[in-house]
Image (spheres, rainbow, N blue to C red):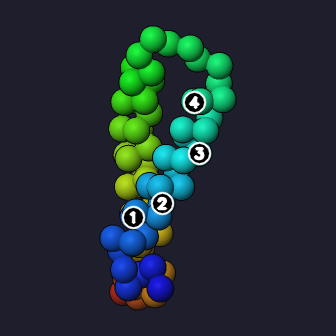
Amino acid sequence: MFNKFPALRRILIYTILSYVALVTVNNSGYELENMWLIYTPMFVAVYVFSRWVDSKLATDPIKDQKKHNRDD
């Protein structure tokens, strides 16, 4: 299902990773006056990591197998 809707897959991955990161940071005990000093790099890292995860999930194993067979 998620291969048919890549935008939905990306949103789901980003939402799950963002939620986990927010819970982790909020339960870490940091008490800064401006929490965006932690949130901004965290969300950037979550975005980069979610794009990497999406690229790994989006690869088609059948296509990879056919490509591998042609190379041999």
* Looking at the image, residue 22 lies above or below residue 7: above
* Looking at the image, residue 31 lies above or below residue 42: above
Q: State the SS at label 1.
A: helix
Residue located at (47% from left, 69% from top) = 57
Instruction: Calculate the distance from the C-alpha at mark 1 to the C-alpha at mark 3.
Output: 16 Å
Residue 28, numbered circle:
none
Q: State the SS at label 2.
A: helix
Q: Position of residue 49 (x, y in %)?
A: 44, 48
Amino acid found under the numbered disc labelled 3 = Val
Q: Is residue 25 left or right of residue 8?
A: right
Instruction: Calculate the distance from the C-alpha at mark 4 to the C-alpha at mark 1.
Output: 22 Å
Between discs 4 and 2, the one toward the N terminus: 2
Amino acid found under the numbered disc labelled 2 = Ile
Instruction: Calculate the distance from the C-alpha at mark 1 to the C-alpha at mark 2.
Output: 5 Å
Between discs 2 and 3, the one toward the N terminus: 2
Mark 2, residues whose alpha carbon is within 10 Å: few (<14), some, or many (≥20)?
A: some
The quadrant in which residue 6 appears is bottom left
Mark 4, residues whose alpha carbon is within 10 Å: few (<14), some, or many (≥20)?
A: some
Q: According to the image, label 4 marks what residue?
A: 25
Q: According to the image, label 2 marks what residue?
A: 13
Q: According to the image, label 1 marks what residue?
A: 10
Q: According to the image, label 3 marks what residue?
A: 20
Instruction: Calculate the distance from the C-alpha at mark 4 to the C-alpha at mark 2.
Output: 18 Å
Residue located at (65% from left, 24% from top) = 28
Q: Is residue 31 left or right of residue 28?
A: left
Amino acid found under the numbered disc labelled 4 = Val
Q: Nearer the viewer, mark 4 or mark 2?
A: 4
Q: State the SS at label 3.
A: helix
Mark 3, residues whose alpha carbon is within 10 Å: few (<14), some, or many (≥20)?
A: few
